[in-house]
Image (cartoon, rainbow, N blue to C red):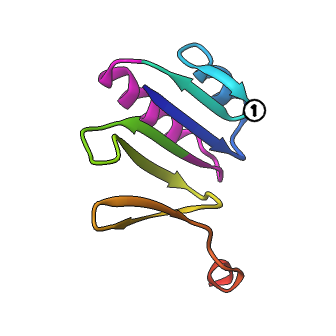
């Protein structure tokens, strides 16, 4: 299973993804696809962000049972703490740097 969260991306990219995944809300996609399809979709997302951001959550053999991958500019940061992925919202000072 995979979950894609898109922020500030072109509508055409969202439309393209609806061929493979369900769009639960604007920019929130979920579905079960093979690993090769998942990688091709992620490559397409990366190529077509145009200033937006994307977060992919997919199943994994990790302790948490999932892996988080990000690209582009998003409102969140994912940090690894001893093998656990934690999400952090940057402070205003960090955003201005």
Determine whether 75 is above or below 14 in the image. below
Residue 53 in percent (x, y) is at 60, 50
Which residue is label 1 attached to? 26
Q: Would you say 66 lies left or right of 78 here?
A: left
| Magenta segment includes 41 | yes
Residue 68 in percent (x, y) is at 42, 48
Residue 96 in percent (x, y) is at 68, 82
| Magenta segment includes 74 | no
Seen at 52% across and 37% down, the residue is: 45
Determine whether 55 is above or below 32 in the image. below
The crowding category of the residue bearing disc 1, from other C-alpha atoms within 10 Å (few below 14, some 14 to 19, many at least 20), is few
Residue extent of the magenta highlight: 33-54
Seen at 62% across and 74% down, the residue is: 90
Query: Secondary structure under badge 1?
Result: loop
Q: Would you say 68 lies left or right of 8 here?
A: left
Seen at 65% across and 61% down, the residue is: 75
Which quadrant would the N terminus be assigned to in this image? top left
């Amino acid at each position: 299973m995979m979950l894609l969260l898109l922020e500030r991306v072109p509508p055409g990219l969202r439309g393209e993804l609806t061929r493979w995944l369900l769009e639960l809300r604007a920019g929130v996609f979920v579905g079960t696809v093979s690993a090769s399809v998942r990688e091709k979709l992620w490559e397409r997302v990366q190529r077509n962000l145009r200033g937006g951001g994307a977060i992919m959550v997919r199943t994994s053999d990790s302790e948490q049972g999932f892996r988080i991958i990000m690209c582009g500019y998003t409102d969140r940061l994912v940090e690894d703490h001893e093998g656990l992925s934690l999400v952090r919202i940057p402070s205003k000072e960090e955003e201005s740097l």
